Image (cartoon, rainbow, N blue to C red):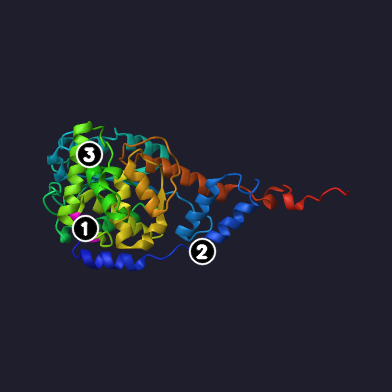
Amino acid sequence: MPVTDPAALLERTVRAIAPPDADAATHAAARQDRLTKPPGSLGRLEALATRIAGITGQQRPRLDRRLVVVAAGDHGVTAQGVSAYPQSVTAQMVANFLAGGAAINVLARHAGARVRVVDAGVAAETPHSPQLLRLRLGPGTADFTRGPAMPRALAERALAEGIALFEAERAGAGVDIVGLGDMGIGNSTAAAAIVAAVTRRPPRAVTGRGTGIDDARFEAKVVAIERALAVNAPDPADGVGLLAALGGFEIGVLAGVYLAAAAARVPAVMDGMISGAAALVADAVASAARACLIASHRSVEPGHAAMLEWLRLEPLIDLGMRLGEGTGAALGITLCVAACRLLDEMATFEEAGVDDSDDVVPPES
């Protein structure tokens, strides 16, 4: 069932977002220093677990219930020749996700995470499957070089549907950590436009090759983004308006998931360029949501570095990835789980009966 009052749900969620729990983070950091290891010897894993303690409000967080949300949507800007692949690929990949044959399925299984696939607004027909949430907010967005990608009311609904999705998953199988991924031909064009609008960087500086486009398509992609920004003049401080102007439906749903995760004190692991654009939208709607974000990796897409800098996030890994689907997020989840297990399961010096450095009496001189 569609959300009946998107504005009310969005407002309630934003109001519920609280800052990290400083007390839980302090206790986690103190425990790190008592574990059977030299202080700081586990590097960024220690800081990661401490940060997750602050996000969750738990001194020793456990991330047993893991979810990856993969939202799919099409983009009208593909009419401008910005992609090497036809729009039909989006629906075909949705079917592949449902069959368990995509890269995200493999990495989610490795991470012990369930995958929720969402048809946010795919142009072609998608399978009727209990594994697929068929929101179908439209048959793809409008061509944003000619006007807004979607009406403002539909942008608000996309955000609300993402919130409702997360809340339903949490009420059902539960969610201790969520990773966000995407699918949609043309979505790297929309994402680059959002990055350019928010960071005020030139479109050419934040636009990449996406699906591996040639020089001619790259130039068409840059021109399309320049036109979209000129035609729509989005206000980067207005998250709903930003989404309405530049799209897409899947970006809106993912932004809603970020907002709901922040309200529920659940760490949200970003993937690459498109889920990062959704994070920028969520940040514009409620800047407090930024505190729940964890950057899994650094994409080779140039706009991704710009958005990470804007959000002040340091990625956990850099493997030259640019697939999307939530693949980087799934790998990031495994590191989050490992970091929290080290914090929770390692013995302290006192528990293990091991001398701490402070306990060693120096020899007499």
On screen, residue 342 above or below 157: above
Residue under circle 1? Answer: 234
Q: Are marks 2 and 1 in contact (CB under 8 Å)?
A: no
Badge 3 amino acid: Val
- Who comes first in sequence, dot 2 or dot 3? 2
Is 163 included in the stretch rendered in magenta? Answer: no
In this rendering, which labeled residue sits more in front, label 2 or label 1?
A: 1
Instruction: Give the main secondary structure, helix, strand or loop, of the magenta stretch.
Output: helix
- Who comes first in sequence, dot 2 or dot 1? 2
On-image quarter of the N terminus: bottom left
Count neighbours of disc 1 (C-alpha within 10 A) and say few if under 14, some if 14 to 19, many if 20 or more: many
Q: Residue at x 31, y 65 (%)?
A: 13
On screen, residue 228 above or below 331: below
Residue under circle 3? Answer: 94
Count neighbours of disc 3 (C-alpha within 10 A) and say few if under 14, some if 14 to 19, many if 20 or more: many
Q: Secondary structure at mark 2?
A: helix
Q: Residue at x 73, y 49 (%)?
A: 357
Residue under circle 2? Answer: 22
On screen, residue 8 above or below 199: below
Q: Nearer the viewer, residue 11 or 146?
A: 146
In this rendering, which labeled residue sits more in front, label 2 or label 3?
A: 2
Q: Position of residue 331 (x, y in %)?
A: 41, 40
Q: CA distance from mark 2 to mark 3?
A: 40 Å
Single out the residue that lies furthest toward the right. 365
Magenta segment, which residues? 240-245
In the displayed structure image, the side of residue 290 where residue 77 appears, left or right: left
- Who comes first in sequence, dot 1 or dot 3? 3
Badge 1 amino acid: Pro
Q: Position of residue 280 (x, y in %)?
A: 31, 54
Q: Residue at x 18, y 64 (%)?
A: 4
Q: Nearer the viewer, residue 1 or 265?
A: 265
Badge 2 amino acid: Ala
